Amino acid sequence: MPMRTKDIVTMGIISAILITQQVALSFLPNIELVTLIIILSTIIYGWKTLYIIYVFVMVEGLIYGFGIWWINYLYVWTILMLITMLYRNKRSPFFWAILAGTYGLCFGALCSIPYFFIGGASMAISGIISGIPFDAIHCISNYLVVLVLFKPLLYLLERIIKNDTSAN
Amino acid sequence: MIHESEYLLITSTISSTSHGQGYNKEAFFIVLSYLWGKAFFMPFERKEIKMKEKKNVFKAILGTVVLFSVAAILLYVYFNKNDTATEGRKEILVQVIVPDEETAEFTIITEAETLREALDEKNLIDGEESIYGLLITEVNGRKIDESKQEWWSLTKDGEFSEYGVDMIKIQDKDKYELTLMVGY
């Protein structure tokens, strides 16, 4: 992954957008744009999204403290990026909305992995069950956010990149 | 409709057969037969595109329905798995555990249906209302210190509770523990 100055600036800006929107929307439970931005970034920038994810995770830790949730953040967003990499050529907003919704629904289960090691299966399972309402909201909000914003944002990003390439 | 690539093909055909002397019959027939062929097959192509579009719409609807159905089933299971409360008078035991402090025990005799109602009767808890119910911030006068990442854990007979205090339906002889935890 060779990085040019332009890439570093772009990754920095996207990371900043990711962090800003997360903090701005943190009062809304499980309604976020992180999933959408990571999907879009992976489609456009591929593996370079790893930089964005880990800058985001690092800053989130500095803002909210490095708790168990932070261990979840070390892998949950990377899993989303890896899944997105598999379907990177897809352009249907419905496809991405369904994928983002499924990811939102599984988010609690993904986050419960550390609890298997901390408190055993009972702690992990009770965590998953108690998180069902949160996951359901996450599922619906992810689905709607991606369905509405995926196409216009992808169009804008692709136009920016096209203009940028033609300028060089 | 003629695509840009087809336009190029037609113009290159005309120019390659006209030898710079204007349009001739050969070029005219080649282009005409191409356009006729395209016009002939267009309904089939259109039908194919329409079929594909229909298939995609069907897939999108099916995927959405499946996703929301799974979410609805999970919510249904979550809200119906909850036990029902014992009717009438019941006696429950609540332990308040703070590390390095003596465990406080409260026996509550109540006719309340939920744990929250029972705890409220004794003014044992306080907290912040959220769309998911009460987030306990204070138990028996001991407030959490968010800067130290403190929080109250609710367990029933030592097992982590799957529901918040608002949703726990109490039964006679239930035993609950409210433990002050440190670290999210």
Image (cartoon, rainbow, N blue to C red):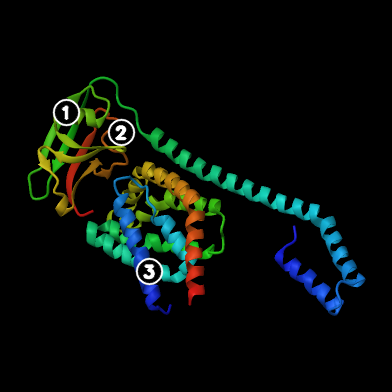
x and y, in percent, of residue A63 in the image: 23, 58
For the residue pair B13 and A20, the one nearer the viewer reads as B13
Q: Residue at x 33, y 54 (%)?
A: A21
Q: Residue at x 57, y 55 (%)?
A: A92
Callout 2, which amino acid?
Answer: Met
Q: Are discs 3 and 1 both within one chain? A: no
Q: Are discs 2 and 1 both within one chain? A: yes
Q: Is residue B173 visible?
A: no
| Closer to viewer: mark 2 or mark 1 | 2
- Which dot marks residue A11? 3
Residue at mark 1: B108
Is residue B89 depicted above or below B96 in this figure? above
Residue at mark 2: B167
Q: Is residue A21 visible?
A: yes
Count neighbours of disc 1 (C-alpha within 10 A) and say few if under 14, some if 14 to 19, many if 20 or more: some
Q: Residue at x 37, y 64 (%)?
A: A14
| Closer to viewer: mark 3 or mark 1 | 3
- Which dot marks residue B47? none
The answer to which of marks 2 and 1 sits earlier in the sequence is 1
Q: CA distance from mark 2 to mark 3?
A: 44 Å
Q: What chain does mark 3 sit on? A: A
Q: CA distance from mark 3 to mark 1?
A: 57 Å
Q: Quadrant of residue B152?
A: top left
Q: Secondary structure at mark 2?
A: loop
In the displayed orientation, state which residue is furthest to the front.
B21
Callout 3, which amino acid?
Answer: Met
In the displayed orientation, state which residue is furthest to the top.
B88
